[in-house]
Amino acid sequence: MISGFPVKKGQMTSIYTPTGQRIAVTKCIAKPIKVTQIKTIEKDGYQSVQIAFDSKKHIDKATSSKIAKLKLDIKPRFFQEFKLTSDQIPEVGNDITIESVFNDGDLVDIVGVSKGHGFAGVVKRHGFRKQPLLGSSNRVRHPGSIGAQTPGKVVKGKKMPGHFGVETTTVSGLQIFSINHETNEVLIKGSVPGSFNSWITIKKIS
């Protein structure tokens, strides 16, 4: 089957095991996804499965023509590709459910876009220490020196104030606690990147 699955992030909550242990989990909704294309080594140079998920009222011409050729009654918002992890190749137009890709207890990587925090200084953005309260009070949260006389410029990649967040982030080694087949609800141990109702990707650990 495929190597990952897109889910919509929900709220965090706590659940209790039969032994009384309290575990923090993130609720996610994993509705079935539609297969729209099978890419092969002979034709495309690599092998993968393209899927469509989510929906919207209006789609562009390129998307509508693609869907019309496939004779599918959907208006997808997103397309995504996943590698094949087995010899079982799904057919175009078929649905893939999360229970066919993952099982309870699987260790996974979660990929999402982190929350935006606006323009932030170096203390908040990079975790710098504050400067001592000995000199000017308006320099406490400033970065201090940002370079020497040689080479006479600020080197590329220097940690500076700037836009904090809204970056693709991966959290590795999380565990799928449970999958509810009836409600399409997935519980993932711990916190995952992204804001409420944002789309994240669950990937198998390679």
Image (cartoon, rainbow, N blue to C red):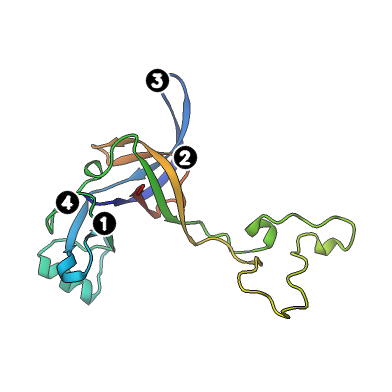
Q: Name the kind of residue labelled 3 in the image.
A: Pro
Query: Mark 1 or mark 4: which comes first in sequence?
Result: 1
Q: Position of residue 175 (x, y in %)?
A: 39, 38
Residue of label 4: 95
State the SS at label 3: loop
Q: Nearer the viewer, residue 197 or 39?
A: 39
Q: CA distance from mark 1 to mark 4?
A: 16 Å
Q: Residues within 10 Å of mark 3 (few under 14, many from 20)?
A: few
Residue of label 1: 83
> On residue 18, which mark appears?
3
Q: Are marks 2 and 4 in contact (CB under 8 Å)?
A: no
Query: Mark 3 or mark 4: which comes first in sequence?
Result: 3
Q: Name the kind of residue labelled 4 in the image.
A: Asp
Residue of label 2: 190
Residue at image position (47%, 51%) is: 193
Q: Name the kind of residue labelled 2 in the image.
A: Gly
Q: CA distance from mark 3 to mark 4?
A: 34 Å
Q: Position of residue 145 (x, y in %)?
A: 77, 68
